[in-house]
Image: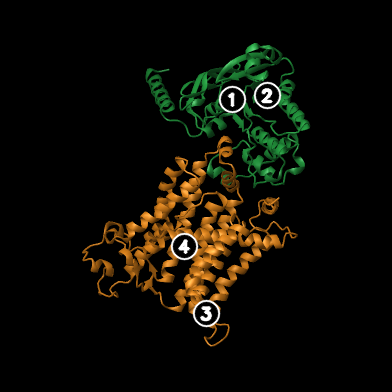
Chain colours: A green, B orange
Amino acid sequence: MTPDLMQAGAARRAAYEAKAVGGKPRFVSEEPYFGQGVALYVEDITVSFDGFKALNKLSLTIDVGELRCIIGPNGAGKTTMMDCITGKTRPDAGKVFFGSNIDLLRLKEQQVAQIGVGRKFQKPTVYEQLSVFHNLELALKADRRVRASLFFKLTGAQQDRIDEVLVLIHLRDQAQRTAGLLSHGQKQWLEIGMLLMQDPRLLLLDEPVAGMTDEETERTAELFLGLEGKHSLVVVEHDMKFVDALTQGCKKVTVLHEGSVLAEGLLSEVQANQKVVEVYLGR
Amino acid sequence: MSGAPSLAMADAAALAPRGALLGARGWAAVAAATLTITVLVPLLNLMVPEDNALHLGDFYVSLLGKILCYAICALAMDLIWGYTGILSLGHGVFFALGGYAMGMYLMRQIGTDGQYKSAMPDFMVFLDWKEYPWHWALSDSFVAQMLLVVLAPGLLAFVFGYFAFRSRIKGVYFSIITQALTFAAMLLFFRNETGFGGNNGFTDFKRLLGQPLNSPATRVLLCVITGLVLIGFFLMARAIVHSKYGRVLQAIRDAETRVMFTGYDPVIYKLSIWTLSAMMCGVAGALYVPQVGIINPGEMSPAASIEIAIWAAVGGRATLIGPIIGAFFVNGAKSWFTVAFPEYWLFFLGALFIAVTLFLPNGLVGLFRRKSEGVRTGHDA
């Protein structure tokens, strides 16, 4: 290679890097890297609202394909933690990385979603006036820009993918029904289905079985266990039976209290932990 | 189960054949409307002799033309309010801007036939202006002014919408600042220095593209064009709301945070439909001015903008045909009421709005739908 060619290459690279550092890309094209086995890395994040510390130096690592349950009393900071990861709240300090290269704190909500983090809200949030099918279609992984949406046509493969998810969330026979007419548990499932349509690497699920019947809860646990491995899941839940079903006695559980991690370990271990019993389980 | 009827209807809409713009009945209705406006109206007005019972008087032609313009506004309002859930109480400003852009051209077309027999518009002579202000530079060109009809409201809406949506201003706060926007514009246009004729606005038009505006043929032609524009906009709106883009808009209306966490940028979606809606109002204003013969800052009054929202609400939001019916119903009632019981019109309008809010959450269209509940055709156009 001649020196001037190398020089030109270096100049182009410098220009590219300057652009990458300076402007925040509107639509994220950078791919997250999971080669080090870490899906989500949270370090020392602190959030305070009017002096009240909702999160206090919280650190957490979720491995690729891991299913992690997070428990903790009300006000422990579980929802605030999800807000920080998904770009809804900016922490005062700390780091949040997706894979080993994506700094989530730089991204806006929709960019976090585009890069592969799906979030389910505590209260089921679906598009009430649209049909179940159209709810899923909107969540389908596709170009999110205005022009692409205006001329969007479902391909056969995409149609099949929607069908597949409809079966998975047990709403196959309700596909043309308006989402607002579904039962509470069905709406929860629809929202989970919408997350799956986005094909995210990491799913954040905030109390996914709240308001579900026992049977629905059981089926949800089965569904999540089926997703484990393909996706990383973070499940915030109060229902100990559900947590027990998910961890199957061999997975780590994290206990949050007053904005930081109080204990981490097997469910049986943390249930035996004196501190945990004091703040949460014993009451 | 009080919300059930409306949800059941949306259900029927979702089951409508996908890909097809309209059903067979829908196309038949569009064809009938097109024939009525292009054949029946000119025939009854120009060909049928005046003493015949079937004759359509000039008064009714201009009333029809006026209401068709209002219907375009109501349709534009429906896209932004009914489908996207953003209530604008300032659409009158876009309507007026389109009207003023057309009015400037019409003022230049008067030539030396004005009161002062000057080449310049009367109000400029009156103010003793010797040359045209900068924004009148292109007013002699029909093409340039027609571009301004869509560009002026479009640009204002884009800039205003960009800052409002980026700052996540929503709901009633957004409605209030749109109201303030139109009010501020009205005050600006009231000033003589602004160069738009002050509180008198523009009037005394003579010609459009050399054609005399007071001839019956021109009036009918303008009415026909307005009708065709409305039908065209209706089909465009139909294509929009039945695309995935339209469903994203409805999703923004129902659960904006979910839309964001699904990876869509709501700002761009809202901004695009908001700007389009403003441009449609601009076109309506441009068609309105030559038919009514006057444009003044009164069109920017807060009440005028609120009326547009009332038409949409009375007819039925989130159904495209509803707001058109609403515009016809309210303005038809207005023209009859203000003759029969002039002092009671505003009471009636208020009562109508309250009645619709309380008893007809889906407007007049909802009433018909409820009646024909058994016939679930999915025909929501």
Is the same chain shared between marks 2 and 3?
no
Q: Which mark is residue B284?
A: 4
Residue B231 position in % (x across, y down)? 56, 63
Q: Which mark is residue A230?
A: 2
Q: Residues within 10 Å of mark 3 (few under 14, many from 20)?
A: many
Callout 3–callout 4 Cβ contact below 8 Å: no
Callout 4–callout 2 Cβ contact below 8 Å: no
Q: Give the SS element for disc 4.
A: helix
What residue is shown with label 1? A78
| Image depth: mark 2 or mark 1 in front | 1
Q: Which mark is residue A159?
A: none
Is the same chain shared between marks 4 and 2?
no
* Observer able to see residue A229: yes
Is the same chain shared between marks 3 and 1?
no
Quarter location, residue B105: bottom left
Tag 4, which chain?
B
Callout 2–callout 1 Cβ contact below 8 Å: no
- Mark 1 vs mark 4, CA separation in Å: 52 Å
Callout 3–callout 1 Cβ contact below 8 Å: no
